[in-house]
Amino acid sequence: MEHTSPFERIIRGVLIAAVLLFFLFPILWIFLMSFQTNEQVLRIPPSLFFSPTTINYTSLVTGKLQTAAGSLDLAFMRNLGNSVLLSSVSVALALVLGVPAAYAFARFKFPLSEDIAFTLLSFRFAPPLLVLLPLSLYFQAIGLDDTYIGLIWVYQLIALPLILWIVRGYFEDISPDIEYAYRIAGHSWLQTFTRIAIPLARPGIAAAGLLAFIFCWNNFVFALILASADKQPVTVGALAFVTASGIQYGQIAAAIVLSVTPTLALALFAQRYLVEGLSLGAVKG
């Protein structure tokens, strides 16, 4: 066993602390900003010591923002609810469609299978502006413009390719012999898929769903062009903090804290499933 000297352990601890401080300090600073007024945020030099206030969070929850030019109505909580609705339903739909498709691409070889899979993946990397104009015209023609259904449909361009390719890799890591043995015992293909393949790939499905949720949550362009103010997510609604009287930095910081809370909670919840991915190698033949 390799032994390290006390000096090496101290150096390692200092370096780790420096790296953590480098990456976590912006998050800490935004959290502190959310409890400051605009005057406190903009003072020079900045200070870590101040009298905290909850006025920024109160403004977001009540929908009333006080500025130098007067009172301004906000729809942040509605935007936050829109983000939860759009991201959750989009990822759920993508999982329903993408997990069986990923299994099919992993287990069955058919003509043009790789070409089809790559084409689906290419949708993820296509610039949003490339499809926005035809989508906008198409949605206006079929009545899906400025609707939740239309946005959820467009969000499949974000979620479905991610889920398809990530979950496909997990299915490929699972030995087919386990499924063959279960089929020989008299079970149907559907039972094998739901009782064997999906439970074994659950960590991959959780990871893919989490990534897809984060990407859907952070999307800005689609909702900005294809939805009106009452259906826009929090990423677009944050534009309301740039007012004629200036930028409301305190409210922006509070909005960031509130908007990252759902994704952070989801990541902490899914963490226990992600750890199970370490055991996938045990089922390889």
Image: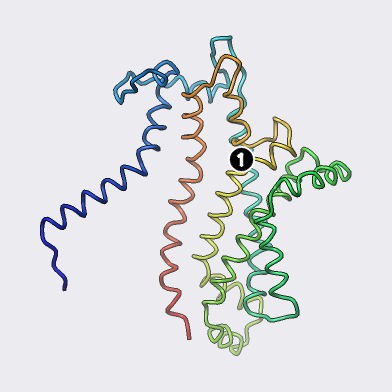
Q: Is residue 81 left or right of residue 136?
A: left
- x, y (%) of residue 6? 10, 57
Q: Residue at x 33, y 18 (%)?
A: 51
Q: How many marks?
A: 1
Compared to residue 139, the image places residue 98 above or below, namely: below
The amino acid sitting under disc 1 is: Ser
Q: Residue at x 34, y 43 (%)?
A: 22
Q: Say which quarter of the image contains residue 45.
A: top left
- Circle 1 residue: 83
- x, y (%) of residue 211? 54, 55
Q: Residue at x 70, y 63 (%)?
A: 120
Compared to residue 104, the image places residue 183 above or below, namely: below
Q: Say which quarter of the image contains residue 24.
A: top left
- x, y (%) of residue 225? 73, 37
- x, y (%) of residue 189? 66, 80
What residue occupies the far left of the structure in this picture?
Answer: 6
Q: Residue at x 45, y 62 (%)?
A: 274
Compared to residue 176, the image places residue 46 above or below, namely: above
What residue occupies the far bottom of the structure in this picture?
Answer: 184
Q: Say which quarter of the image contains residue 119.
A: bottom right
SS at circle 1? helix
Q: Is residue 129 left or right of residue 217?
A: right
Q: How is the image coloured?
A: rainbow
What residue occupies the far top of the structure in this picture?
Answer: 69
In the picture, which quadrant includes the N terminus?
A: bottom left
